[in-house]
Image (spheres, grey):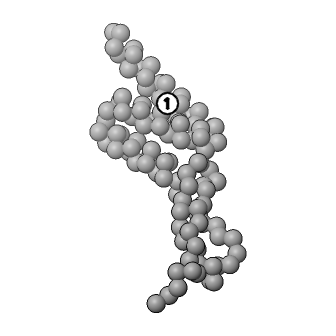
Amino acid sequence: MAKKGNRQIIKLKSSQSPHIYSTYKNKKNDPERIELKKYDLALKYANLYLEMNKKEDDILLIATSYERLYEVNKKMGKTAIALNYHERMVQIRDSIRTLEVT
């Protein structure tokens, strides 16, 4: 049976968002610094939510999806992408208001 002393729990902070991953590191096999590339979960779920809402063809939910993508990208520091999602959200919400008034 292997010793538990060689394994160490480590926390990895995403370089693009505040998300923190936890994993195990074997001190004997990997004595140096560990770097892993993982897909950011918040962005993954926001994109999944958008795709589901596009299939449903519900404009209000699509606007909400763009708002979530805006928030995630803004927190990640991707301001150009965040601005693009914000503009799409505003455009959809303005068109909904125009339809409600007429």
Residue 52 sits in quarter? top left
Asked whether residue 58 is in view, the answer is yes
37 horizontally vs 48: left or right:
right
- For label 1, the residue is 88
The x and y percentages for residue 83 are 59, 33
Q: At 58% from the left edge and 73% from the top edge, which residue is drawn?
A: 8
Task: Give, as a three-letter code, the residue at label 1.
Answer: Arg
Of all residues shown, which one is farthest toward the top? 102
Work out which quarter of the rendered image holds the C terminus and state it. top left
65 horizontally vs 10: left or right:
left
- Vertical relation: 52 (above or below) 85: below
Q: Residues within 10 Å of mark 1 (few under 14, many from 20)?
A: some
Asked whether residue 81 is in view, the answer is no
Total labels drawn: 1
- Vertical relation: 44 (above or below) 80: below
Q: At 48% from the left edge and 53% from the top edge, which residue is drawn?
A: 41
25 horizontally vs 63: left or right:
right
Give the camera-side residue of 95 and 21.
Answer: 21
Q: At 35% from the left edge and 40% from the top edge, which residue is drawn?
A: 54
Helix, strand or loop status at disc 1: helix
The x and y percentages for residue 68 are 47, 37
83 horizontally vs 66: left or right:
right
Give the camera-side residue of 90 and 32.
Answer: 32
- Vertical relation: 82 (above or below) 100: below
Q: At 62% from the left edge and 50% from the top edge, which residue is drawn?
A: 16
- Vertical relation: 102 (above or below) 72: above
The x and y percentages for residue 82 are 58, 37
The x and y percentages for residue 47 are 44, 46
